[in-house]
Amino acid sequence: MKKNLMMIGAVVSATLVSATLVSAALALAGCQSGPAAQDGGTAAAADAAPRDLKEMVLVPGGTFLMGTGAVGASQPIHEVTVSSFLIGKYEVTVGAFREFVEASGYVTTAESTGKGGWSSVYNWMVVPKLNWKNTLFKQTEEEPVCMVTWYDAVAYCNWRSGAEGFTPAYIVDGTEVSLVPGADGYRLPTEAEWEYAARGGDGSPGNYNYSGGNTLNSVAWNGSNSNMRPHEVGKKEPNGLGIHDMSGNVWEFCWDWYAPYSADAQTDPLGPSSPTTRVYRGCSFRESDVQWVLVAWRHEPTKDMIGDNTGFRVARSAH
Ligand SMILES: [Ca+2]
């Protein structure tokens, strides 16, 4: 397996996905991976077809160099191997989250605590009335859900697993959440999976600053083109795996607790075991600072923050 040297600011190497590997993995997972695998038809036909906003993309496993030497928290660059997994083509939408809430009766953290959420519109004041249904943005069903917590995301994952006949990936006991070994259900991506997918996996045509390219406005809703609000998912160019909005739109929670990287080579890392705060990735519609939007940038959330620029996307193991 070739390795990509992940250096920010330069396309360092190009690798090609093994067609055999992809085909085998697709057959194993019983799913389709990117745009090329979806219809075999014309772009016009694809545009005319309704979008499956819950679509999952297969990410064939591989080895990559995670992190960057250019940004403090993303150092040191270290070798990581990830097994094949599936990840949402889009961030979880308002409509998908509404389906979960209406079917389960779930009440989000912002609502159950009565604290509400942090609004960028109110200069990051916490406003009790704000929650995923009332974000001040007047969101459509196809925009990414926001003002959710990591626990809200975990609850969504387990509900969706049950609804679709998969084994739930999490055991939840109050604020204690543990992974079920070998479960095939929905879960949050690990931080390593997130970065590997954002970079385009091992089949990336290059290692870009942002997920899908080096022109930020082409691939990401960010502080310079968003009018300071989230946008419908999938409207910016996808990355090499056909995944949209990994850079920009809303920050995306990962499984891992935040802690400095180890320099050691790792396989399917799950992050540190000591509780800190859960990492989120990818930046949002608010930021245009070049470092924050970099695909390797790591963010340690403010504890208990329920922001109107934070959401999530789901993953599933495929091994
Ligand atoms: Ca995003």
Image (cartoon, rainbow, N blue to C red):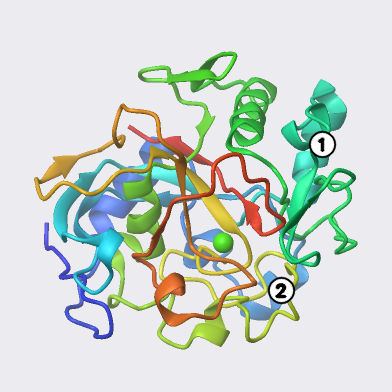
Q: Quadrant of residue 75?
A: bottom left
Badge 2 crowding class, 10 Å Cα cut-off, few under 14, some 14 to 19, many 20 or more, is: few
Q: Which residue is mark 1?
A: 99
Kindly state the secondary structure of the residue where label 2 is placed: helix
Coordinates of residue 135 in the picture (x, y in percent):
84, 55
Coordinates of residue 91 in the picture (x, y in percent):
62, 54
Q: Is residue 58 visible?
A: yes
Residue 299, above or below 224: above
For the residues bearing labels 2 and 1, Cβ distance under 8 angstroms? no
Q: Which residue is mark 2?
A: 47
Query: Mark 1 CB in 8 Å range of ligand 1?
Result: no
Task: From the viewer's perspective, tell me whether residue 262 is left or right of residue 177.
Answer: left
Dot label at residue 298: none
The mark nearer the N terminus, 2 or 1, is 2
Question: What residue is at 49 percent from the left and 38 percent from the top?
Answer: 188
Query: What type is the residue that disc 1 sits on?
Result: Glu
Dividing the image into four quarters, tell me where ligand 1 lies.
bottom right
Kindly state the secondary structure of the residue where label 1 is placed: helix
Question: What residue is at 64 percent from the left and 39 percent from the top?
Answer: 149
Residue 296, above or below 104: below
Coordinates of residue 186 in the picture (x, y in percent):
54, 32
- In the depicted view, which residue is nearer to us: 68 or 313? 68
Q: Is residue 202 visible?
A: no
- In the depicted view, which residue is nearer to us: 24 or 114? 114
Coordinates of residue 140 in the picture (x, y in percent):
86, 60
Task: From the viewer's perspective, tell me whether residue 39 is left or right of residue 133.
Answer: left
Q: Nearer the viewer, mark 2 or mark 1?
A: 1
Question: What residue is at 33 percent from the left and 44 percent from the top?
Answer: 25
- In the depicted view, which residue is nearer to us: 189 or 126? 126
Give how far apart the Cα atoms at labels 2 and 1 are.
25 Å
Residue 82, above or below 169: below
